Image (cartoon, rainbow, N blue to C red):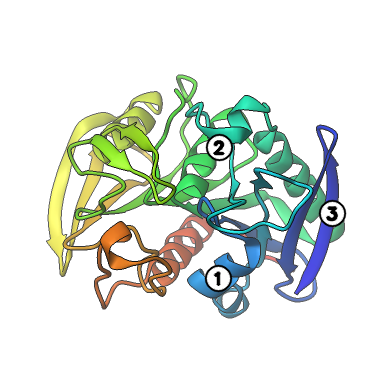
Amino acid sequence: METIELEVGGRRRRALISRAGAGRSPAVIMLHGAGGTAGIAVTQTRWERAGHVAGFLTAFPEGTARDPAHPAEFRRNPQTWNDGSGRGHVARAAVDDVGFVAALIDALSAGYGADPDAIFLTGFSNGASLAFRAAAELPGRVRAIAPVAGHCWVDPPAGSAIPLLYLMGDSDPLNPIEGGEVTTPWGGQERHPAPRRSFERWIRAAGCEIAGERHQDGPIEWTDAAGCEIAMRMGLIAGHGHIWPGGPRLLPQRLVGRGVSGVDATEMIARFFAALLAQRGSTFA
């Protein structure tokens, strides 16, 4: 695992990188949740291992701490992303996290062998919301996104057609399935939209139909957008809370709910990204 530091918007930004091997590779950028770190994301999601198996370069960028003069710490000095919701210190300070993602894509392409036409974004919670925002605001630079347990707070430009795999637990106390007021792990009150609104916002921008087919596969209810030439899927995981599916629960169950066994988001997302590459007929030398 290597560390890269970039100057973006007058701030020193950092990411961990795991190379896929020699030559050109597709790249997955994994954005941690609010209060998390790059290291936590590595452990929580196991994307480094999955990347090695599937041939993806993986990158784990760091958000911005409330007090950058002190080490990040979940409760007293959490790292977060400016996801377009207007929440928190990152919004008040106008932290340019979309610019950071763009600079990281440039660095991965220039110095680490990433294919600039095969950049994928995924993320958890607040990081999932940044994946939505960065893809919406960086046209042509992101091949597909796979947000987990986050919201699309921004309006994608009309005509944007970026494949989407969107995962959410239907028992997530921080993202009520019908939307509503939530209490954050820091004790604040926020109003969150229904997750299906994020799905609808994304597929509307692509010109697809909202009413898609639904089917059950084990604990997951899948909805596929209709009238789409690209993959647009939302999976609701029955009984699952605010936890990366297949990863450890990092906070008390009273705050985040419980996890459901047998669902591995990393494996599922890796297959989704690999299928898109196969459709493109890409080979990486």
Residue 283 is at least partly visible in this image:
no
Which structural element holds mark 1?
Answer: helix
Residue 190 is at least partly visible in this image:
yes
User: Residue 22 appears in which quarter of the rendering?
Assistant: bottom right
User: Residue 32 appears in which quarter of the rendering?
Assistant: bottom right
Name the spot of residue 147 as percent of width and height, x first. Answer: 43, 49
Q: Give the vertical position of 77 relative to 228 (above or below).
A: below
Q: Residues within 10 Å of mark 3 (few under 14, many from 20)?
A: few
In the image, which disc is placed on residue 5?
A: 3
Which structural element holds mark 3?
Answer: strand
Kindly check if marks 1 and 3 are in contact, taking CB atoms under 8 A apart as contact.
no
Q: Give the vertical position of 209 relative to 285 (above or below).
A: above
What residue is pinned by disc 2? 135
Q: Residue at x 38, y 71 (%)?
A: 249
Q: Give the vertical position of 193 relative to 216 (above or below).
A: above
Front residue of this view, candidates 32 and 144: 32
User: Residue 250 appears in which quarter of the rendering?
Assistant: bottom left
Amino acid type for the residue under numbered disc 1: Trp
Q: Judge left or right: residue 83 versus residue 249.
A: right
Q: Earlier in the sequence, mark 1 or mark 2?
A: 1
Name the spot of residue 220 as percent of width and height, x first. Answer: 20, 61
Q: Residues within 10 Å of mark 1 (few under 14, many from 20)?
A: many
Q: Quadrant of the N terminus?
A: bottom right
Amino acid type for the residue under numbered disc 3: Glu
Name the spot of residue 270 as percent of width and height, x first. Answer: 48, 66
Amino acid type for the residue under numbered disc 2: Ala
Judged from this view, the residue extending furthest toward the top is 158
Q: Judge left or right: residue 36 versus residue 250.
A: right
Q: Earlier in the sequence, mark 1 or mark 3?
A: 3
What residue is pinned by disc 1? 47
Which structural element holds mark 2?
Answer: helix
